[in-house]
Image (tube, rainbow, N blue to C red):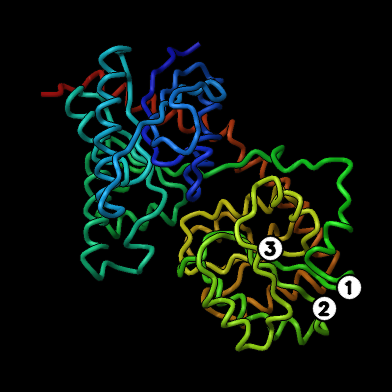
Amino acid sequence: MSTPMKILVLSWEFPPRIVGGIARHVSELYPELVKLGHQIHLITPEFASAPTQETVEGIHVYRVPVAPGNDFFHWVVNMNESMGKLGGQLISELGDFDLIHAHDWLVGDAAIALKHLFKIPLIATIHATEYGRYNGIHNDTQRYIHLKEYNLVYEAWRVIVCTNYMRHELQRAFDTPWEKMDVIYNGIRPEKKRHHLNFHAQDFRRFYAEDGEKIVYYVGRMTYEKGVPLLLSAAPRVLTEMGGNVKFVIIGGGNTDHLKQQAWNLGIWHKCYFTGFLSDEYLDKFQTIADCAVFPSLYEPFGIVALESFASRVPVVVSDTGGFPEVVQHTRTGVVTQTNNPDSLAWGILEVLKNPGYRQWLIDNAYEDLKHRFHWGKLALQTEAVYRQVCQERQITTWC
């Protein structure tokens, strides 16, 4: 058996604190690395009543207090100060850490400081970039984040990205050397989507739609780059061709006033249901009664939401932006449509709703694909290989 490694992980989100995809990524990747015999110590901000220290599926989790800030960026500075302090304490007390693994720019300052203070190699996973999110850097806020991202990428021994698309993006945005980056996909635990045998699907379904209506849904953040207005713009054509028998369900927290106004202006208000935030347990049930999931993003480094739908056996329609075309194979595991094109999006939705045999074909292929390309056990082995490479290079490197 290979020598076990001791890894210090910094992540600004970890369950029950879930902001985006990073929480799911770190909470599902590292238990697999624990199974491979490695010791994982993860530092994250405190959240609600979650314990300040606990072991979660073998991960040693430490939640640090963060002093309130004048704004979000001040809060991030305070978070890094707390993370750096505890990280230094853990390294001093436990000793012999092989690597530091930082997830995104928000924890970069602490990770970089610990790297230099203790001469421990730093690995960074970049989940998204400000450059990609806004198609360039246009204002001082974006420049601040961009510089933080650049510093983390520059200081990292190696950089992990979730798609080949992101590898190209880092090369464009930061001039990152191609050979410095490794592509390791995100994964999912399909077993999370198993449902209770006593679940009455038809009764549950009637909360959202009439018996004759198909259910098309979006789930995610209500931010510009997610493209939710495009789904609403595509809805009238879908409704016309389906005889009005479709309900569009928009799931997610945040301000949806502009979306509700758009639905009203389009005359489709009565065919839309804005649920607000849904818990994972409730969402799992909802997905069993849905007919189509739609993710019309303008920017999407990977798209874990697509994997969630694969695992839930819901056919997906996505835009051809970012990493989506790598994750969703067009006409095999889902339908890929043109980005920022409501007509193309409507066509994709109708392909799924009008062709039940094709719909089932997509569902079966997508679920099978989870085993081959998105299984956390396989992805952990790929991550371990990156760790081993860095550790071996560190042994033959003089660090002044």
Q: Quadrant of residue 191?
A: top right
Vertical arrangement, residue 287 with respect to residue 35, above or below? below
Q: Give yes or no for contact between labels 2 and 1 (Cβ–Cβ under 8 Å).
A: yes
Vertical arrangement, residue 352 with respect to residue 382, above or below? below
* Residue occupied by mark 3: 293
Of marks 1 and 3, the one in the foreground: 1
Residue in view at x 67 percent, y 79 percent: 346
Residue in view at x 23 percent, y 69 percent: 139
* Residue occupied by mark 1: 212
Vertical arrangement, residue 250 with respect to residue 265, above or below? above
114 vs 13, nearest the viewer: 13
Three-letter code, disc 3: Ala
Crowd band around label 2 with a 10 angstrom C-alpha radius: few (<14), some (14–19), many (20+)? some
* Residue occupied by mark 2: 245
Give the SS element for disc 3: strand
Q: Quick one: label 1 or label 3, which is nearer the N terminus?
A: 1
Residue in view at x 78 percent, y 64 percent: 291
Compared across the picture, whether 261 is left or right of 73 comes to: right
